[in-house]
Amino acid sequence: SVARSGRVTPMMFEHELLEQARSDRKRVVLPEGGEERVLRATDVLLRRDVCDLTLLGDVDAIRKKAADLGIDLAETQIIDPHTSELRQAFAERYAQLRAHRGVTVELAYDVVADV
């Protein structure tokens, strides 16, 4: 029998974290979807099959940048908050959640598009 240490290596920690994420799959929404760093993180998360992803930003610009980087976004939802029919619903929910800080629906409408 092999003796095991109680120490957790960085690789063991990462493996356990990824397994937990896969077992309780969530949707992660990433703003600034056209940024290279965000697209590279998206690629890693998709390849590791960790979560469902939504990128926020200009749909055409995101798809072009991803193609230039060789990143497949077929399994990724992309929402442009400026043109989405969900913008009003997002703003209302955001205003509800931030009402204690004085956020109005009008302010929230602008905030949810600022990605």
Image (spheres, rainbow, N blue to C red):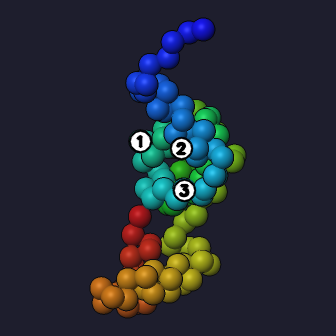
- Cα separation, mark 1 vs mark 2, equals 9 Å
| Left or right placement of residue 43 versus residue 107 in this view | right
Viewer-side residue, 61 vs 49: 49
Figure quadrant of the N terminus: top right
Q: CA distance from mark 1 to mark 3?
A: 15 Å
Which residue was labeled with disc 3?
28
Q: Earlier in the sequence, mark 1 or mark 3?
A: 3
CB within 8 Å, label 3 to label 2: no
Sequence-first disc among 3 and 2: 3
**Residue occupying the point 64% across, 44% down:** 22
Q: Secondary structure at mark 1?
A: helix
Question: Is 104 left or right of 91, judged from the image as shown?
Answer: left
The secondary structure type at the circle numbered 3 is strand
Which residue is under mark 2?
A: 42
The answer to which image quadrant residue 48 occupies is: top right
Q: Nearer the viewer, mark 1 or mark 3?
A: 3
For marks 1 and 2 on the same chain, the one whose residue lies earlier in the sequence: 1
**In front of the other: 13 or 74:** 13
Residue, x 50% and y 17% (percent of image)? 4
Expressed as whole percent of the image width and height from the top left, the position of residue 72 reads 64, 39
- Taking the image as shown, residue 69 lies to the left or right of residue 52, namely left
Residue at 43% of width from left, 90% of height from top? 105
- Residue 23: give x, y in percent of width and height: 66, 46
Disc 1: which residue: 37
